[in-house]
Amino acid sequence: MIFNEGDAVEGVYFVYKGIVKVHKKWGSEKELIIRFASNGSIFGHRGLGGDNLYPISATALEDSVICYMDIDFFESTLRVNTEFTYKLMMFFASELQESERKMRNLAHMSVKGRVAQALISLKTQFGSKEDGSINIELSRQDLASYAGATYETVFRVLNEILKEGIIESAGKKIFIKNQEKLSELTAE
C-alpha cells in the first residue's frame, strides 16, 4: 500500500518501474480499480485541489520503483515549467475522457462486455509476453474490480468466454485467442 483513500495529500508519485493499481472503495467491502499506473505514469494527482485528501488508494502489484515528489515542489514546478504543466493538463483531459467512458460502460454495457473491454484495455496498456499472455497477471478479484463487477459474475463470464474459445487461461495468465470476437462482446 502506497497511500490510502482519505490520507492527507503530501505529494504525487511517478512509477519508474512496476505496476500500481489506483483504486477506490465501492461499498463496504468492495473496491473499484480506476486504472493501472505503469512505467512513466503519474498517480496521486487526484488529491490535488479540494480538501487535500486522497480520494483514491494506491497499491503496488509487484516490486516497483516509485518516485515521490513533495507537493510544494510539484506545485512550484507547475508554476515555472509551462511545458510540463501543459503536458499534465493534456494528461488530465485524457484521463477525464477515459473516466467518462468507464462510467458510461458501467451504466450501459453488460458485464460480459465490461470484462471483454477490461481484457482489451489490459492488453493495450501492457502488451503481451513472449508466450502470448497479457503482460500483467491479475487475481480474478482484481479483474472483477477493474471491470466493475462481482468476483462471482466475472468468474462465470470468464468461463463462458473460455468455453467459446475467445480466451485461454493458465493460473493468472490470460491469453486472448480471438481479438475480433472479444471486441464484438463490447458492442453487446
Image (cartoon, rainbow, N blue to C red):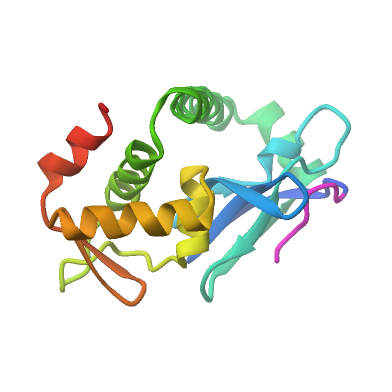
Q: Does 137 sit above or below residue 70?
A: below
Q: Which residues are magenta?
A: 1-7
> Does any portion of residue 156 appear in the rendered image?
yes
What x and y, as percent, mark residue 97?
A: 47, 22
Q: Is residue 50 left or right of residue 3?
A: right
Q: Main secondary structure of the magenta part?
A: loop
Q: Nearer the viewer, residue 48 or 97?
A: 97
Q: Is residue 136 left or right of residue 36?
A: left
> Does any portion of residue 17 appear in the rendered image?
no
Question: Which residue: 49% across, 57% down?
Answer: 152
What x and y, as percent, mark residue 20?
A: 55, 59
Q: Is residue 165 left or right of residue 48?
A: left
- Indicate yes or no whether the magenta region holds residue 77: no
User: Which image quarter: residue 135?
Assistant: bottom left
What x and y, as percent, mark residue 144?
A: 49, 53
What x and y, as percent, mark residue 4?
A: 78, 55
Q: Nearer the viewer, residue 70 or 108?
A: 108
Question: Which residue: 67% across, 31% down?
Answer: 78
The number of numbered badges drawn on the structure is: 0
Q: Quadrant of the N terminus?
A: bottom right
User: Which image quarter: residue 156?
Assistant: bottom left
Q: Is residue 26 left or right of residue 101?
A: right
Q: Quadrant of the C terminus?
A: top left
Question: Which residue: 66% across, 56% down?
Answer: 58
- Indicate yes or no whether the magenta region holds residue 3: yes
Question: Which residue: 28% across, 33% down?
Answer: 186
